[in-house]
Amino acid sequence: MGRKTIFITGASSGIGRATAELAAGRDWNVALFARRGDRLADLARDLGDAALALEGDVTRPDDLERAIAATVDRFGGVDAAFANAGRGAGSGGRDGWRAMVDVNVMGLLYTAEAVLPELKKTKGTLVLTGSAAGRMHIKGSVYGATKWFVHGYAGNMAEDMRDWGGRCCVIAPGMVDTEFFDQGKPDKLHPEDVAAAVLHAIEAPERAAVREIFLMPQH
């Protein structure tokens, strides 16, 4: 049986990069999608022949469609997809809200739209990056509201995908020590912790549909 393939958005750093590294170490092919092509190229070089760097933007459906086609051409199919790309609102206001919704909501939908036809062929798994912020109410948080969307969509997709043997899981971490924050958070979750949850979801036996994994820092 050949190696399976996972397509990862937001793969150039943080959770996406850690997931790519862990998956490659477990004999998965990894298709790496992000805007920062230089970082992707470095990561793909480190991971070797099992990796494919695909520069693009999740807010552009054409970029995603080309990336999925290139993944299938290189590896023969897609067995799992990790829709991980996300962002905060920056300085906020209308422009910040729109940019965040474009990535966190529309980018997620575009990713699913592009990859689902391939996942249907393999009865594959779609994993979405949610957040603890999508499981609780935070005063005035528009970011949190976008993650509530992710959690709702994940549940809906799990019901839809089960009809053809596929699975959908949302990974909901609390604070993770990534570039999302201006200052390091070494005592919080590490990207590798979240990556392990992603691999747990996609490598679960066919009889088990892992629909949500909720991780919080111990301290």
Image (tube, helix red, strand yellow):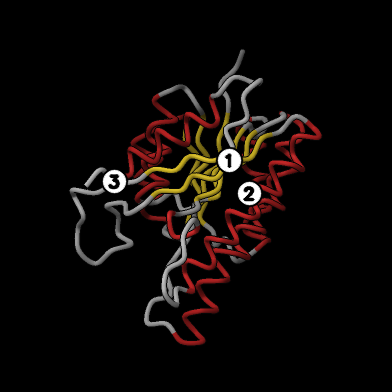
Looking at numbered disc 1 in the image, what kind of residue is underneath it?
Cys
Q: In this view, does 7 lie to the left or right of 34?
A: right
Q: Earlier in the sequence, mark 2 or mark 1?
A: 2
Count the labels in the image. 3
Q: Distance between the residues labelled 1 and 3?
A: 20 Å
Of mark 1 and mark 3, the one earlier in the sequence is 1
What residue is rendered at 77% in x and 43% in y?
A: 160
Q: In this view, does 43 lie above or below 48?
A: below
What distance separates the C-alpha of mark 2 from that of mark 1? Answer: 6 Å
Of 165 and 137, which appears nearest the observer?
137
* Image position of 86 (left or right of 209): left
The residues tagged by marks 3 and 2 sit, at their Cα atoms, a distance apart of 23 Å
Circle 1 packing at 10 Å, graded few (<14), some (14-19), many (20+), is many
Residue 212 place in picture, x, y as percent: 54, 41
Residue 171, how many percent across, how many down? 49, 44
Identify the residue at the far bottom of this view: 94
Q: What element carries label 1?
A: strand
Count residues near mark 2 (Cα–Cα under 10 Å), then give few for <14, some for 14-19, many for 20+. Answer: many
Q: Name the residue under label 2.
A: 154
The image quadrant where one finds the N terminus is top right
For this rendering, which residue is in front, 191 or 148? 148
Q: Looking at the picture, does residue 2 appear above or below residue 128?
A: above
Instruction: Residue 67 in the image: state x and y as whole percent.
Output: 61, 49
Q: Name the residue under label 1.
A: 169
84 or 143: which is nearer to us? 143
Badge 3 is on which residue? 217
Which numbered mark, 3 or 2, is in the foreground of this view? Answer: 3
